[in-house]
Amino acid sequence: MSSKILAVCLALLPAVSVGWPWSRDMMNQISVKPEHGPDSIRLFPQRSVPMAGTKVLIHLHDADAAAKLLNPNPPTVESVQRGKKFYQVFCTPCHGQSGTGDGLVGEKFLIRPFDLTAENEQVTMPVGYIFGKVMYGDAIMPGYGNDMSPSEIWDVVNYVRHGLVSDSAALAAVAAIKKP
């Protein structure tokens, strides 16, 4: 009989232990909410200057504002190479190494990621629009403005425009050689 009582007590122990004081420590703490109170988050003061090493996002209101942006990074070999490294980290999972939307993650989507080697992305679409898309994302694509600085995003744009097509042509040539 005593073993049955012990089993019932052990079975009820988790339900009873919720009432102990240490189970409420997180509920009864003083919370600091940055959106409330005298120290709430405010806009930058007028004439403020960002400190070295910090990131400041460019605020764009719509796609037309982004399309008007001009690339401050000239498409040098160094810029394209830096952009390629960032492309491999952030873009390859969805768009693939070739940029045609054949990445491992992109294959899982119902809607295939954009083919970045297509004429629309290479010729027609303004570089500012590509910058805005990478910076802020859209309904499907995540924004990378918190992960890369604006200069690094412009390097990715330089790679998409000036290095991706030649790299994807080289990949296609290697794939053609490997096939019997």
Image: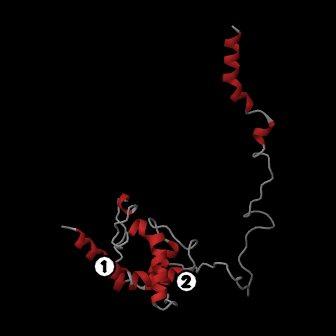
Give the residue displayed 48% in from the left and 70% down from the top. 89
Residue 98: x, y in percent?
A: 34, 73
Query: In the rendered image, is residue 111 in sight?
Result: yes
Badge 1 crowding class, 10 Å Cα cut-off, few under 14, some 14 to 19, many 20 or more, is few
Q: Nearer the viewer, mark 2 or mark 1?
A: 1
Residue furthest toward the top? 1
Residue type, mark 2 in image = Ser
Q: CA distance from mark 2 to mark 1?
A: 27 Å
Give the residue displayed 54% in from the left and 78% down from the top. 61
Residue type, mark 1 in image = Ala
Query: In the rendered image, is residue 133 in sight?
Result: no
Q: Which mark is residue 170?
A: 1
Residue that mark 2 sits on: 151
Residue 162: x, y in percent?
A: 39, 86
Q: Is residue 132 above or below residue 75?
A: above
What element does badge 2 sit on? helix
- Quadrant of res 130: bottom left
Quarter holding the C terminus? bottom left
Camera-nearest residue between 129 and 38: 129
Quarter holding the N terminus? top right
What element does badge 1 sit on? helix
Q: Which mark is residue 26?
A: none
Residue 148: x, y in percent?
A: 56, 75
Camera-nearest residue between 170 and 11: 170
Camera-nearest residue between 160 and 27: 160
Taking the image as shown, residue 4 lies to the left or right of residue 86, namely right
Badge 2 crowding class, 10 Å Cα cut-off, few under 14, some 14 to 19, many 20 or more, is some
Are dots 2 and 1 in contact, CB under 8 Å?
Answer: no
Give the residue displayed 60% in from the left and 78% down from the top. 57
Give the residue displayed 24% in from the left and 69% down from the top. 178
- Quadrant of res 34: bottom right
